[in-house]
Image: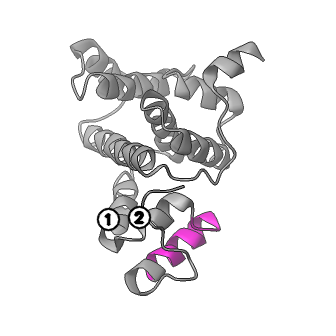
Amino acid sequence: MSRIESVSVEKATGATEKLYAVIKSQLGGVPNLFQALGSNPKVLEIQLGLGAATKSLSSKEKESISLVVAQENDCAYCLAAHTALGKMVGLKESEIISARKGKSEDRKLNALLQFAKEVINHKGNVSDATFIELKAAGYTDSQIPEILMSILSDIFTNYFNRFNETEIDFQKATSLEQKETL
């Protein structure tokens, strides 16, 4: 059971109700994460805005970042959500598993995932080699703050969901260990 009392779609009013309408129009419903954040509409608005701030990244790049960050932060809710969202934007099951491992057959996406994984595992410190590879893969100086913003947004939701014990309302993601034995 969640620690923070969620604001259901039926009970939402004011700013929360308006934000829910936007979420519902994009996702077809309001996931439990957003209903929990609905208790503070300003935080919900900021969280939604962080995703909108990453305009130069494709949906596949954003979802791939979210998958590796959720994997590294061991957030079951976000793994489930971003597995579903990844499929919605066209990621294949094999690409989802690879992204969770911080890898891709695509050189550009692989550099992005390695960068994100290193940011998470080294608290923002990234080796020169990883940075050079990111730039060599085609990411620009103006995209790097967006990449970091995407990672930051994911860290927030990972930590929030872990703290809140948010009930998973997506199909649970299979552990990587289980995937390897199948």
- At 35% from the left and 47% from the top, the residue drawn is 156
Q: Is residue 125 left or right of residue 86?
A: left
Please tell me whether mark 1 sits on a helix, a strand or a loop.
helix
Which contiguous range is marked in magenta? 18-30
* Residue 76 versus residue 81 in the image, above or below: above
Q: Which residue is mark 1?
A: 43
- At 62% from the left and 22% from the top, the residue drawn is 176
* Residue 18 versus residue 173 in the image, above or below: below
Cβ atoms under marks 2 and 1 closer than 8 Å? yes
Query: Alpha-carbon neighbours of circle 1 within 10 Å: few (<14), some, or many (≥20)?
Result: few
Identified by mark 1, the residue type is: Val
x and y percentages locating residue 141 in the rendered image: 23, 36
Question: Which of the labelled discs sits on residue 2, or is there none?
Answer: none
Find out whether residue 28 is within the magenta segment: yes
x and y percentages locating residue 93 in the rendered image: 70, 32
x and y percentages locating residue 158 in the rendered image: 42, 43
- At 28% from the left and 37% from the top, the residue drawn is 144
Q: Which residue is mark 2?
A: 37
Q: Main secondary structure of the magenta part?
A: helix
